[in-house]
Amino acid sequence: MATTSRQIDVALLRERVVAEARALLVELGNTNAAGIVRATSHLERDLGLGSLERVELMVRLDRAFHVRLDDSAVAKADLLEDLATSAASALQRELEVEPLLPKHSGAPQARNSAWDFAAVRNYEPTSVAAGTIPGHAAGVPLAKTLNEVLRYRAENDGDRPHIFYYEGDEAREPVTFGELFCVAQRVAQVLSERSVAPGDTVCLMLPTCREFFYCFAGILLAGAVPVPIYPPVRADRIEEYAEKQIAILNNARARLMITFDRAERVARLLAPRVQTLRGVVNANELVAAKPKLLAPGAMPAGQAARSETDLALLQYTSGSTGDPKGVMLTHANLLANIRAIGDAAGITQDDVCTSWLPLYHDMGLIGAWMVPLYFGLPLAVVSPMDFLSRPERWLKMIHRHRGTLAAAPNFAYELCARKIPEVELNALDLTYWRAALNGAETVLPETLERFADRFARCGFRREALLPVYGLAECALALTVPVQGRPARIDAIERDALSAEGRAVPVASENCDVSRFVSVGAPLTGYEIKIADAQGHDAGERREGTLWFRGPSATQGYFNNTSATAALFLDAPPADGGAPWVNSGDRAYWADGEIFITGRAKDIIIKAGRNLYPHEIETLAARVPEIRRGCVIAFAACDAKTGTEKLVIVAEVREPALLRDPERKSEVCAAIGAEVFGGISVPPDAVELLPPGSLPKTSSGKLRRAETRQRYLAAALGRSDGAAWMQVSRLAWAGFRERMRSAVVRGGQAIYGLYVLLVFLASIVPTWTLVKISRSRKFSSRVTRAGL
């Protein structure tokens, strides 16, 4: 690309960006790419490029211009020309350092020394031979609360680095165990000064950042209960986001909200509609605040005794707006599950954890942070956005920190297997990674195979892949497979499972096959029962509902008696033990291991057969025009036939397709053919939507129930309007709530003044007359009249 006097030909650069986008769309199956790609094209609305496709496009632009585009600018880009602007800025920075741009060749070189492990810290983990599991770590066995764990680590490992936080490729100063406790104590005291009392709930609306760890620990030390919620991400969905969070905050009876700069305005829009909320505070200000000097003999925050039965966390599960479900987890629940995880994973003092998982999600909060905190392990962490923009960052952290433990949902392994550039693999060493846990969503056999095959050259061992199962109602984990062997995949007859609920191993190559991945056996101290419709044990290789019980089972949902009642068995267990908890998942036993087949509420019953949404969605996504991971299958009641009908809703890659009835019909027919060919049942209805239309949870999972509701209400794909309109409506709703509160308070004040005036107008004359009267009879009459 020609440059003169260090000036960049922006027009030529814009053309190159358009050409790269056009080439990507052609590869993705968009046959009209040449006609629809313009510099002013909207990445998602016009081109159908979601977060995963952006990763691919960004990698291509990095290679094309031999620079590294700014992640945040790419994440915020709406139009292709925004990417061109980002590329121009990156090139300009490059020219300031190296004026001769053409001397670069091949893939971009990593120039940032922050990835140098030795430069980040002096601490080096003891080497662990690949595939070995040394003696277990002791953790803090006598601790009864997380507060005691925090204090123990500060007193015994105060100078040891604990959290290595990366912002993009930049490593920040590590946080030691001692610093974590010290700052958390200050936060706890400031919270106490803000009238946060033990037992109050405090909302954390924070992204992955150092302040999250300080504030979460500070809330615990103050004796309060943290309530993590996800921060706003998309401006065009701000109204939908606000309604969900308002429902959660009201249900949790939040006393205070802790947020960050970019979300503070949104937080203040929510505040007027949450009656219990007494304030919104910026996390940076909270961490930097200087608490008041304690009076002589006063007890510092965090020193007051806390009970193991006290609430330690309210973890809100993905649910509908009107019925938020906050899983109540005590200190005892969390510590029991953490210890069981440590035992199952064979955690040692030589382990090193890495994570990109969001901290508002149980897998990131409990699995990625609380487990290493309890066992005194180092944790290298990067934000989810930084991972999604460049998935190789996660694996680079594992390489640099010699990471041994890391967990992620299935899509993350798929993203790494498909999107990390080949050149990045040459410098990766994944030999030390002994436990790659895969959970939180359906584990696909194909993903495990692709990931293991792709990264074998980097020293990754197939035996390290550990498909696991857990749920928030159990704190986090419930099952873990045996280590040291490849993941077990069960191939069974599809018809026998869907029609009879029997998991029959495939005996002939001619059978239609369903494949499920083993998630192992229950953790030590936990029990699982696969129950039939009558609540009895279903037996070996018979599908049923998964019930569980154990030391970390929740006591129910906070402030939600109806949902809590549905969570437990109606009758006490016959063995007199703890009550069984309904997981809501379908599964079967086979040779002492559990195989999850799907969510009970999502299974589609059609013509006497059980159809599994994830299978249907995988089949539909094979059609080139459909966006992978953006398909939802569900059942809707068909009044004419008296049975359920199979509905598929999918996002297309190319929005222009929806304006062409002929092409739209062809795509719907192709989806029907793929589904029928796979499960021998055709869909009854196929709905196509533009990119970004399907509702998702905070952790990126598709919302089947909400999609079904929108389908029944004929509201699929309906836009909420421009971001400014949504913000205006939120502001108006907040203003109305403030005015309503002001009118109520004003009415109360006026009524109080009225009562006072009436009281004075009657009591003063009555008292005066009684005082001067010498007749008891007269005084009695005056008093009665006054009253």
Image (cartoon, rainbow, N blue to C red):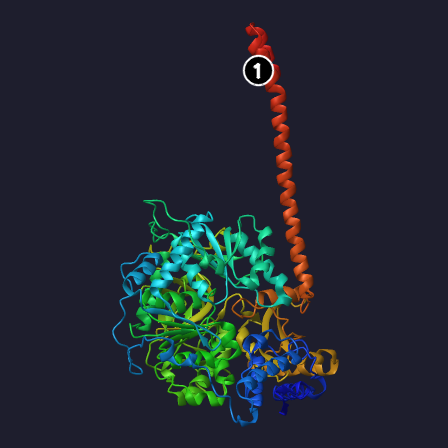
Q: Amino acid at mark 1?
A: Trp
Q: Is residue 519 visible?
A: no
Question: In the image, 34: left or right of 445?
Answer: right
124 left or right of 191? left
Instruction: Please tell me in which quadrant of the rendered image residue 720 appears.
Output: bottom right
Closest to the observer, 745 or 514 = 745
> Residue 725 lies in what quarter of the image?
bottom right
Name the residue that disc number 1 marks.
767
Label 1: how many Cα within 10 Å (few below 14, some 14–19, many 20+): some
Quadrant for the N terminus, please. Answer: bottom right
Q: Position of residue 582 (x, y in %)?
A: 44, 61
- Residue 473 point in image, percent of width and height: 43, 61
Q: Residue furthest toward the front?
A: 5
User: Which quadrant, please, contains the C terminus?
Assistant: top right
Looking at this view, is 11 or 71 the one in front?
11
Q: Which percent across, then down, holds residue 247?
A: 56, 55
In this picture, is 342 found above or below 626?
Answer: above
Residue beneath the point at 31% across and 62% down: 154
Q: Is residue 666 above or below residue 739?
A: below
| Residue 232 in view here | yes
697 relative to 250, above or below: below
Secondary element type, mark 1: helix
